[in-house]
Amino acid sequence: MIRFLGVLNTDQIISWKAHKIYRHMGFTFLILLELLQCCDKKNHLLARIVDCLLQITCDVMKAVTIDVFCAWAEVNKFSINLA
Amino acid sequence: MEQGCHLHLNKLQIEQEDQQLQTLIASSAYLTIEKYQKYKPANELIQMLSTIARKPKSLQELLQHADARTMISMIEKCDGNQKQWFHALTNTHIFDSEESMACLEKYCYLCTQDDIDRLLNMSTNYSSPKTRKLTLKCVSYLPLNELIVVTTRYFHKFGIINNLDDGNIRSQLVLALNIIKNVNSINDSFTSKIVLLLLQNSQEVLKHLYQECLKNSVYSLCLKELFLAVKEIILIQSLAISTLTSVLKSIEISSENTSQIVQLLNILLETDCITHEEFIGKMIVPFLEQFLQEGRLSDLQIMLSIFNVSIFV
């Protein structure tokens, strides 16, 4: 699961608790979706990027369990602390 | 790259502060599905997203279900939807909440005629100086024609009341009247000031205006435009004629002030603030009867001469 989270310091992540990871997943997922919405799918030059994005988003989605999804409901007015 | 990611996430969070992450993702998923529905490579993703996608709430839905706190924070954003959030706030029990009142005060210039109608209606249930002051402040931002409309509507609905009187009317009136030098002094700004004062206590204001006209006939001429503008207001509950009658009763009618009285009467008759029926029925006849009963024959004579010279004849 950690592989899908992008380039992060593995030592740092080990100390993270579940809710922090889920939150991070949520925001990453959100950004991926927003990126997909930005892309012009008719642009052939972008086709490869779009396809990659779709694949990545799928992979992240596969990691989203019920626990993760429910955790997202609790993320509200808290400030993000990714460090 | 991580810093850039961090900043972007911060921006996201600031924009969507009041929504849950789950809602945001569900809405975003819905929009993504909409966009990639016909794109074959996206089929797998679309299937997965449809399990969590939810149509984002329209602004109307958000407005309907929001509480006052949410509305205030949306107004503070000062974005394109600010006005709609503001109108939603004026639909709440705004005078019951300190926070709502503070927001109203800060953005009072956003009030439309409908907002003011609502505020005026609500203000009749409160008598605190704070509510009064705030209501008057909001009203003062309306342009003249809308101001007259809301004032007329207010008095038609509640009768001639003085719920909004902040006790400061006389000094404001004197200040306003001081600028009158000639007929051209009457402009929209002056008329607006007078209408705002009428909103607070029309009997007091009208009485004072009449008294000034009776002291100095120049005022009658100058204020003709004003009387014309506020006609609809002073016609309510026959305020124009009843105030005039009580003012005339309180002064001493003599041959010296006859011309001022006639001047004022003619202006009011010309502008239709007083009808001819009212003039005779509510003024001339009662005065004549009273003077006859009390044996005040010289006053009777003066009143008859006033009647004689007025334009009605």
Image (spheres, grey):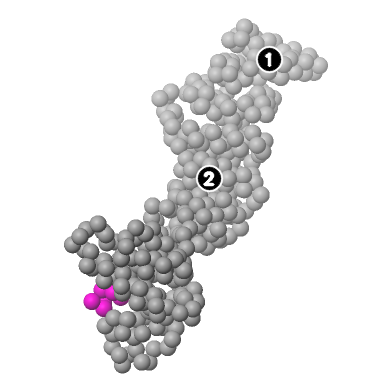
Chain ID of residue with mark 1: B
In magenta segment, residue A50: no
State which quarter of the image contains the C terminus of chain A: bottom left
Q: Which residues are magenta?
A: B1-6
Number of other residues with Cα within 10 Å of mark 1, as a class: few under 14, some 14 to 19, many 20 or more = few
Between B194 and B63, the residue placed more toward the observer is B63
- Report if residue B66 is visible in the image: yes
Depth order, front residue of B247/B119: B119
Label ID, residue B277: 1
- Amino acid type assigned to the residue bearing label 2 in the image: Asp
Q: Is residue B236 left or right of residue A72?
A: right
Q: Which residue is painted at 44% across and 50% down in the image?
A: B83
- Pointers 1 and 2 within a single chain: yes
- Label at residue B115: 2
| Rendered image: mark on residue A73 | none
A5 vs B132: above or below: below
| Rendering quarter of residue B276 | top right
